[in-house]
Amino acid sequence: MYQFCFQRGLREVWGYMWTAWYCPTKFRLWVRSSEPKFIGRWRTTMSVENFWRNLKHETLHHFVHPRLDQLVYLIAVEVLPYTEAKMQIFESDFRPGRAKALTPYRKAFKKCWKKLALRPLGTQVYIVNLSTWTCSCGQQKYNTFLLCKHLVQAVLAPHPDFFRQVVRRRVAPFYSHCLLVPKDGSELHVVDSGSVSDGDDDDIVGATPTPSLGRGTKRKREDVCTHIFEWLDELLNNFSGLQHGVEAGLAILRTQVNHPREAKIFLSSMKAQNIGGDLAAMGSDVRRLMETGTVRTTTWAQKGKKASAKYTRNTMGVHIP
């Protein structure tokens, strides 16, 4: 990805990819090869693709190339409230007294378990180790849930609560639960080490679930405005510190310019680094927009024209009093 962006001069794309995907803290969350001893639980690529598919076909099916601010508004007002209401179904306090709905993962797991439990066993004898949840038949690696018919049929039919609580661990044993009882009468040691692999992330980090909206309800407009104002306050605080830094830097430059002979090396270094060049270009582009009224024919700059792309970045969203 770095070579792809470097060869095409896509600095902004690589900046986004690094901060959101490829930096060490983010890379470990989605790539499977980063932890050779762990087996990932999520089909990360499929989950991301499914989200974008739903966003494009359910929310943006009436829009062609929507603006960024409109897209953010639709995600905040339509997508997130629906997701929160859907996740509320799996909360422990949702509809007390009724059976809890299975998550999509556990529903598919239960279907696969029931299917494997009905398959006939052959005459070949394999080594089934329930302590590590492995089998020598070699079919586990082809199963989404790391199951095989020998492992499933080596335990008694589990209680229905097992399918509501099952969590696949990333290290052996992949499944460890008190409701898994071997048919041979032996006892299985239930692994309860409190690791993230057990799925008890909230217990480890001390996180508390955020209150969700009622099912079928939409986020209030006041809540959306509150989030926007909080974001604006944070943005203003950041720019306030940046403004003081820029003013201090300009004061230093003015002082050095008044003594060009003594500050020759310093001024040469500033010129080589193009210090203030981006700020000057932004001021020139905004001044041109305000004085001449030059507007863009399209929202985004034309491909291949660096000057047009830079003008677009410097003037998009600027407030003209």
Image (spheres, rainbow, N blue to C red):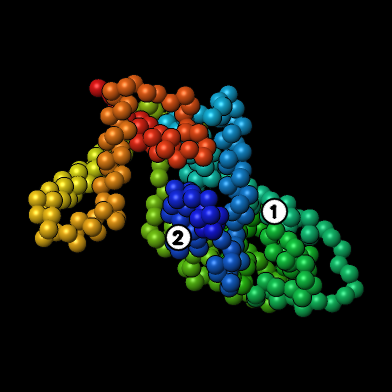
Q: Residue at x 67, y 71 (%)?
A: 133
Examine the rendered structure and indicate whether residue 118 appears above or below residue 56.
below
- Whole-percent x, y for residue 48 in the image: 58, 47
For marks 1 and 2, give the one nearer the viewer: 2
Relative horizontal placement of residue 14, taking residue 221 as reference (left or right): right
Sequence-wise, the earlier of marks 1 and 2 is 2
Q: Looking at numbered disc 1 in the image, what kind of residue is underneath it?
A: Lys
Q: Residue furthest right?
A: 123
Quadrant of the rendering where the C terminus is positioned: top left
Q: Nearer the viewer, residue 72 or 315?
A: 315
Q: Residue at x 56, y 61 (%)?
A: 31
Location of mark 1 (residue): 110
Q: Residue at x 58, y 72 (%)?
A: 36
The answer to whether the residues at label 1 and label 2 have Cβ atoms under 8 Å apart is: no
> Where residue 23 is drawn, which disc sits there?
2
Q: Nearer the viewer, residue 96 or 313?
A: 313
Q: Residue furthest front?
A: 261
Q: Helix, strand, or loop for circle 2?
A: loop
- The mark tally for this picture is 2
Disc 1: CA contacts within 10 A as few (<14), some (14-19) or many (>=20)? some
Relative horizontal placement of residue 93, taking residue 52 as reference (left or right): left
Kindly indicate the quadrant of the structure image that contains residue 207: bottom left
Q: Nearer the viewer, residue 19 or 130?
A: 19
- Whole-percent x, y for residue 233 in the image: 25, 38
